[in-house]
């Protein structure tokens, strides 16, 4: 019998020891009243000499509260007591207290568990309680607008002003008399004007003969493109030669000679531009004269409107009533 009692005591001793290992500590609450969702800070002091390794853990969130965080706070300067801070948020209007919390943490002496005391607590209603007395009548409350609302109104006003001005201009344009557009400038006139401007700059005298030849090539290519209607400005000299062969107006002995003159100028300009061929000042001026002559010889002939020829009628004799002999 004594042996059985000894076995029972040995089996019950760890449970008693486990229960005794959970110490109860007081807890301090930052407030006794709060609204739903407010954060409630709790702080509890560990026994003297205790320290925390890592982060403490709360066994389970109390009923009616949400656990927002838990942390260990080392002692401040001049103190020796560690603290554990817990943040809760209530969500149940029927809450009357913060129930005890069971907290575990690691310390140099091993795993520890502590339990807090219950703390009285109540939740304030969101709406004020109804009163029987009459409430004071207040004036209308002012509405404060943020900066982006002012910006939105300003943009809407600017858009309305722009739309009004656009419709007003459209109406004025419809009411204004139509002015016939100026006829386009013929390609040969544009070319001759560009050649005159280039001659005025006198680039060869300034030691810029290569630039002078490049400008001549651009003027001639633009004129050929407008005169014969193929993209000479974007084509190589070889492609321009092939395009010239498709122009019926140049399929004559005189036309072929003009084509050869233009190709000779373009090939020489290509050597100056890409092969860095040196060019003398006299030759650069001569090229401008040859280009002007080529434009003059290939420009369209002016259209001459001739009046119809009216043959005079034979005089009629007033006596015979017919033609005079």
Image (cartoon, rainbow, N blue to C red):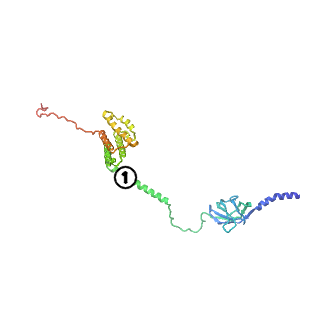
Q: Residue at x 32, y 35 (%)?
A: 257
Count how many numbered circles sit on residues in the image. 1
Position of residue 150 relative to residue 219, above or below, is: below
Position of residue 70 relative to residue 243, above or below, is: below
Q: Quadrant of the N terminus?
A: bottom right
Instruction: Confirm whether residue 4 shows in the render.
Output: yes
Residue 104 x %, y %: 71, 60
Instruction: Locate residue 66: give its quadrant.
Output: bottom right
Residue 35 x %, y %: 62, 63
Residue 151 or residue 298, whichever sits in front: 298
Q: Quadrant of the C terminus?
A: top left
In this view, which residue lies farthest toward the right? 1
Instruction: Locate residue 92: give its quadrant.
Output: bottom right
SS at circle 1: helix
In this view, which residue lies farthest toward the left? 319
Residue 324 or residue 108, whichever sits in front: 108
Q: Residue at x 81, y 59 (%)?
A: 13
Residue 323 x %, y %: 14, 32
> Residue tagged by mark 1?
169
Instruction: Confirm whether residue 181 shows in the render.
Output: no
Residue 4 x %, y %: 87, 57
Residue 159 or residue 19, whichever sits in front: 19
Q: Residue at x 86, y 58 (%)?
A: 6
């Amino acid at each position: 019998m004594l042996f059985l009692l000894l076995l029972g005591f040995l089996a019950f001793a760890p449970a008693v020891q486990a229960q005794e290992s959970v110490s109860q500590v007081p807890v301090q609450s930052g407030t006794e009243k709060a609204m739903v969702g407010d954060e409630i800070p709790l702080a509890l002091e560990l026994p003297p000499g205790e320290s925390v390794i890592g982060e403490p853990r709360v066994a389970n969130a109390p009923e009616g509260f949400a656990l927002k965080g838990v942390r260990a706070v080392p002692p401040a300067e001049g103190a020796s007591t560690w603290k554990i801070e817990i943040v809760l948020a209530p969500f149940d209007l029927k809450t009357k207290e913060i129930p005890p919390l069971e907290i575990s943490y690691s310390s140099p002496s091993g795993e520890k568990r502590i339990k807090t005391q219950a703390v009285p607590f109540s939740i304030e209603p969101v709406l004020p309680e109804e009163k029987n007395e009459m409430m004071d009548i207040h004036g209308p409350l002012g509405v404060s607008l943020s900066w982006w609302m002012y910006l939105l109104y300003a943009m809407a006003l600017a858009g309305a002003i722009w739309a009004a001005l656009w419709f007003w201009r459209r109406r004025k344009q419809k009411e204004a008399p139509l002015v016939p557009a100026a006829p386009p400038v013929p390609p040969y006139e544009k070319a001759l004007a560009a050649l005159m401007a280039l001659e005025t700059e006198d680039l060869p005298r300034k030691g810029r003969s290569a630039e002078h030849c490049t400008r001549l090539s651009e003027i001639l290519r633009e004129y050929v493109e407008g005169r014969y209607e193929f993209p000479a400005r974007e084509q190589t000299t070889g492609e321009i030669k092939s395009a010239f062969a498709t122009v019926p107006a140049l399929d004559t002995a005189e036309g072929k000679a003009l084509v050869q003159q233009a190709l000779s100028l373009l090939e020489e300009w290509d050597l100056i531009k890409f092969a860095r061929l040196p060019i003398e000042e006299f030759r650069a001026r001569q090229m401008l004269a040859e280009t002007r002559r080529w434009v003059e010889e290939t420009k369209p002939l002016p259209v001459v409107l001739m009046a119809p020829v009216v043959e005079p009628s034979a005089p009629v004799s007033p006596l015979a009533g017919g033609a005079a002999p």
